[in-house]
Image (cartoon, rainbow, N blue to C red):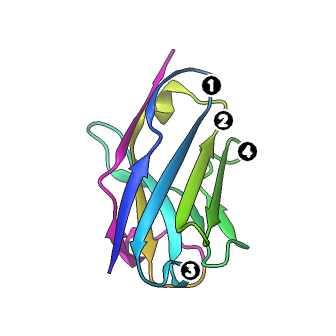
Amino acid sequence: QVQLVESGGGLVQAGGSLRLSCAASGRSFSAYAMGWFRQAPGKERDFVAAVSWGGGNTLYADSVKGRFTISRDNAKNTVYLQMNSLKPEDTAVYYCAAARVRIATMSPGQYGYWGQGTQVTVSS
């Protein structure tokens, strides 16, 4: 069982930066690949980024490549999403998720645990 709590969302102007954090409780955090997804109003939940259990492998959606960076600190049971050069279209609720696999994966069906989400709003 893994519980996930996101933090770090907020309101930022276009071009600005935010860092999201996801704190995990429970056992064996390092046994899980971790991912970030987002859902804008009226849209489906989309993959954003994922990191493997050891942190050495990452995946990104094309829309965020070069702007977002996912990382993890297994000693702190925390995964991060550094978001730079933010655009209004990045506005969404961002969700952290854990998958009981070692490799980074973009498939939402592989994620068995989800946080409650944190709102990110980018103004133009």
Residue occupied by mark 1? 16
Q: Position of residue 56 (x, y in %)?
A: 73, 73
Instruction: Categorize mark 3 by other alpha carbons within 10 Å: few (<14), some (14-19), many (20+).
Output: some
Q: What is the secondary structure assignment of the residue under circle 4?
A: loop
Q: What is the secondary structure assignment of the residue under circle 2?
A: loop
Going by the numbered disc 4, the residue's amino acid type is Gly
Numbered label attached to residue 8 = none
C-alpha gap between disc 2 and disc 1: 6 Å
Going by the numbered disc 1, the residue's amino acid type is Gly
Numbered label attached to residue 66 = 4
Precedes in sequence: disc 4 or disc 1: 1
Precedes in sequence: disc 2 or disc 3: 3
Going by the numbered disc 3, the residue's amino acid type is Ser
Residue occupied by mark 3? 30
Residue 47 appears in the picture as rendered: no
Q: Position of residue 12 (x, y in %)?
A: 51, 23
Residue occupied by mark 2? 84
Instruction: Categorize mark 2 by other alpha carbons within 10 Å: few (<14), some (14-19), many (20+).
Output: some
The stretch of residues the image draws in magenta is 104-124
Q: In the image, which is nearer the foreground, mark 4 or mark 1?
A: 1
